[in-house]
Image (spheres, rainbow, N blue to C red):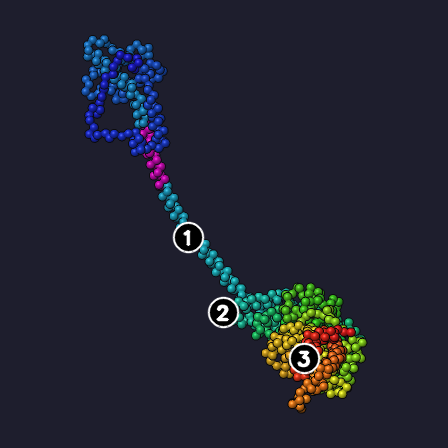
Amino acid sequence: MAATRPGARRPNITTIGSQLPSPHGRPALTVEEWEAKAPLDDVEVRSVLGLKIRCEEKKPPLKFREEDSPSRPSTPILGRHGGLFSSAPGSRSATPVPMLMVTKDGASHPLHPQVPLETPQQFHDWFALIDRSITYSQESHFRSHLQNIEAQLVSCDNLLDRVHGASDDLTLLHNDWQSVEDRGESLKGAAQRLLEERDRLIQVTDAIGARLEYFQELEYATRMLNHPGEALVLQTDFLLMVERVDVCLEYMKTHRHFKEAEVYLLRFQQCLTRAMTLIKMYLVGTLRAIHTDVQKRMAEADLSSTAAHHLLYTKFQSLVPSLSPLVMELENRALSHPDQLESLLSECHTAYFSVRRALLVPRVTEEIRGLQPGQSELIELTRVGCTYLKQVCTEEFNLFRRFFNSGEDKLYRYLEGICDHLYDDLRPRILHEQKLDVLCEVCTVLQALMVLDIPLQSFGDSGAPAPADDDPLQLTTSPTLEAHDSRFPPRTPGLAKLHISHLLQMVLQDAQTRLFFKAQAIVQSEIRNYAAQPKDLDYPAKLRDVAPFAQPEVDDEDEDGDGMTLKMPKLEPESAWYPPLLTIVNVLKKLHEYVKPAIFQDISQEAISLCRVSILSAADLILARPESNDMDAHLFVIRHLLALKEITTAVENATMDYEVVPQPASDTLGNLLRGTSSLFNPTGLLGGMLGPSRYGESLPVVRTTIDEDLKRSCELLITKCAELATAPLKTFIATCESFTKSQPDTLLSTQDFAQLPGIIKVQGEFRSTCETQLSEWAMHVRLYLRDENTIGVLLPALYDEVASVFTAFRKTAETRCSPGCGSSLMALPELWEWLHSLQVGVKK
């Protein structure tokens, strides 16, 4: 409008409100403070920006828009209040100007004066009209925006009313839904309670029905047991009924608080007893029937052994499929109810063994009679008879375990009764046997039958030997039987295998007892009370006779290294040894394998002690012979005591918990002469602390006693040889002593024998005699001991004795006979050198 009318000035039109001062002072706020105190979110910021953009769009007044756009309807000049806006307060009241009609061709304009302006007042009125029109045109977009806002407010009010209505509807709907939900939960709870009550009633009904089933089973069991005939036990439902009765019986025992539980318990026990009685009656009747049949057939004269075996075993085996389940049922119930049913099972065992004994004993008696126990050799009778009984017992055991799974003690009593038919003939022969070798062979046969698993046919018709097992004392059944028994529950360990050793143990004990007493009698007669014959004491002639045939002792490296093995010394040839020593070796060798270690140790101690005494007694007899000398007696003792000590060591290692290391003869003698014998051996001290045995000495003490005797004999042997070798020296010393005592006032040096020539002569005689005696002594030692090392052990002690006597001789000669003669005599180092130069210890 300013562009179209540049000369027009817009008067300052203000409202009364703009001219009145504000009652409150406006605070000075910056843009930052305003932004900080009144922050806008993104939606508000976008709204303000949109409003700003709309406000910046200034539209021309309405009249120009109508001219520019004649197609658009013109905006009335008058407002919605029916007239133009009044002027601001304070201005003059304007004269109403009538509204002109506007035509399309623009012939008349509303702002054009209808009449010419003649007075200033008309001009001012017309100008005020123009000014109001301009003002109205400038504020038209605000009014339009205000109208839009008012329309939107109306729409928002309508929308809010509708939202409030919808909220009220939702609240009502929620209240209705909550009411339905509450009633539904109540209905659900009631339904759930009804279901729980129904389930509880069903459970109660099932529980009552389950408990009633145990009580209702009595009627079915009673009705079945009332059926006539013994064949009732063969029906399929019979064992099932027994199983159910047993279950009901256990149930009644654990629920005695039920009404009438005690009555039903008693009735179920009666039913179970009746059922087991029926099984017992059927078993006994069947066994008696087959006994009658088999006995009738075996009475035939032309019955072969194969047919008899078939009747005794195969025919009984045919009853296993029908009787074994019934017997197993009875055994199981007898374990659970021993007071009521144990007697029934015992009657079954008794009936079975009675039938088997009646059929088998005549045949066993006939077989044993055919062995001619009174005429045949004891060893052969033992071997054949015990082998036959072993086979019979094995077959009886296998047959019994097909029927029964209990009664092991009764089975072994039955088998022992069968074996007694042979033992009655065998036991007197054993108790009266006088030969130790025969008794040993009998023990060997019995131990072989007990230990070695001899292949035997478990049954005559199977043809399969019993399989080997880790335990050699027990026999197992054949694979055929194992395949058959796999249909039934496994057997108890007591009936899994037959202990043959239990059946043969009585005869073996009799043989071992007789062997022990016989060995003890031999020890008393041939060792303790042995009367030595002249040929037994003919030493060293006996050794010279066997010397060309003697072989050096060689250790047997093939022997078992087990500590329980008895390793005796090899006394070969036997003619070179004293008979009691040979006896003790033979007796202990035979006795070791067949008696208990404690008994063997006991008799060994007695035999060794008595043999030691016998050897010492024989040495005294040798010493008393005119053609023998002292060295023969001492060497005889050393020779035999060394062997006896080896025997003692072997017995100790075989019976004691500790081990005694055997030593060669040279080491033994060396330790004795050095004072490190068994007197200082821990095992010897241990044996002494263990106390004496039955015969007054334990093995370590016996070995210590032998060492003492050995040491004493070695010392006597060395002393005797030294006396012979130094005889000239001792004679010279004795002469000097005798002369001094007889003529104390006469100087010894005035005598001819005490002069230097006489002294040198004595030394020469000593050298000659010593060389001769040492050579003879070495020959004797080699002849008796057969060990070159032994001579080397004894020589140092012998040289010490010789040197001691020579030292006394030299001292006597220098101090009492001829002072200064020492230079003409051998010094002690020269003596030792001369003794070693003789090479006595080297075999020539």
Task: Say whether disc 2 or disc 1 marks the residue closer to the N-terminus.
Answer: 1
Horizontal and vertical percent position of residue 641: 70, 79
Which picture quadrant has residue 673? Answer: bottom right
User: Which residue is located at x 54 percent, y 68 percent?
Assistant: 250
From the viewer's perspective, tell me whether residue 636 is left or right of residue 185. Answer: right
User: Which residue is located at x 61 percent, y 75 percent?
Assistant: 682
Q: CA distance from mark 3 to mark 2?
A: 125 Å
Task: Relative to 402, say whether 735 is above or below.
Answer: below
Residue 432 visible: no
Image quadrant in which the N terminus is located: top left
Q: Nearer the viewer, residue 782 or 446?
A: 782
Q: Amino acid at mark 3?
A: Gly
Q: Nearer the viewer, residue 582 or 551?
A: 551
Image quadrant in which the C terminus is located: bottom right
Task: Relative to 136, say whether 635 is above or below.
Answer: below
Task: Relative to 647, say whether 124 is above or below.
Answer: above
From the viewer's perspective, tell me whether residue 336 is left or right of residue 50. Answer: right
SS of the residue at dot 2? loop
State which region is magenta: 151-172
The residue indicated by pointer 3 is: 820
Horizontal and vertical percent position of residue 45: 35, 30
Q: Which mark is residue 190?
A: 1
Q: CA distance from mark 3 to mark 1?
A: 146 Å
The residue indicated by pointer 2 is: 256
- Please state which of the two labelled residues, at mark 2 or mark 1, is closer to the viewer: 2
Q: Amino acid at mark 2?
A: Arg
Q: Nearer the viewer, residue 487 or 288?
A: 487
Horizontal and vertical percent position of residue 683: 62, 75
